[in-house]
Amino acid sequence: MNNLPKKQKGASAIVTIIMLVIIGFGAYVGIQWVPQMIEAKSIDSVLQNVEDAHRTDPVTSVDDARTRVIKLLQINEMNDMTGAFTVKKNDGRITIDFSYDRELNLLYKVKPMHYEKTLQLR
């Protein structure tokens, strides 16, 4: 006569669906964001290698600096980034600027991501 329902063991279907949606959204954003961060870190690595090479074998011209950057981009298989940098010489200093844009699709909004990196060789 005393037929009380037993306590639930585990999550309800609604909570499970909500958790799966949150995990799925995180994975969707992560699949886009992680490659952008890897690309940004690769650009940092290229600039660091140019700076390290400049210490042992100083760059004296804009063309030499451009050649070094292009060579490092090719080694890292980043040929699409060859149009994303400029090399200038001002007051005896060579400046390498990377500037490029990417997009992060958040389903409800596309967020533009702008990346800028600068290296000055003395």
Image: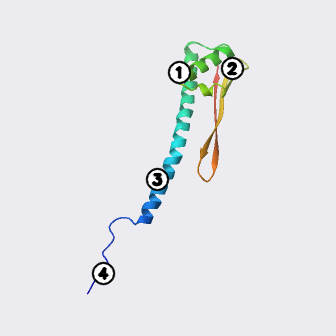
Q: Position of residue 72 (x, y in %)?
A: 56, 21
Residue located farthest toward the bottom when viewing the structure as drawn? 1
Q: Gap in Å between the C-alphas at discs 4 and 1?
A: 70 Å
Mark 4 element type = loop
User: Going from the N terminus, do you reach mark 3 or mark 4 first?
Assistant: 4
User: Going from the N terminus, do you reach mark 4 or mark 1 first?
Assistant: 4
Residue to which mark 3 is pinned: 23
Seen in the picture, residue 115 relative to 27 is either above or below; the reply is: above
Asked whether 53 or 29 is in front, the reply is 29
Residue to which mark 1 is pinned: 75
Seen in the picture, residue 46 relative to 54 is either above or below; the reply is: below
Q: Is residue 117 visible?
A: yes
The residue at 62%/28% (across/down) is 81
- Residue 44 appears in which quarter of the rendering? top right
Q: Residues within 10 Å of mark 3 (few under 14, many from 20)?
A: few
- Residue 56 appears in which quarter of the rendering? top right
Q: Gap in Å between the C-alphas at discs 2 and 4?
A: 82 Å
Q: Gap in Å between the C-alphas at discs 1 and 3?
A: 36 Å
CB under 8 Å between discs 1 and 2: no
Residue to which mark 2 is pinned: 93
> Disc 4 vs disc 1: which is toward the camera?
4
> Disc 2 vs disc 4: which is toward the camera?
4
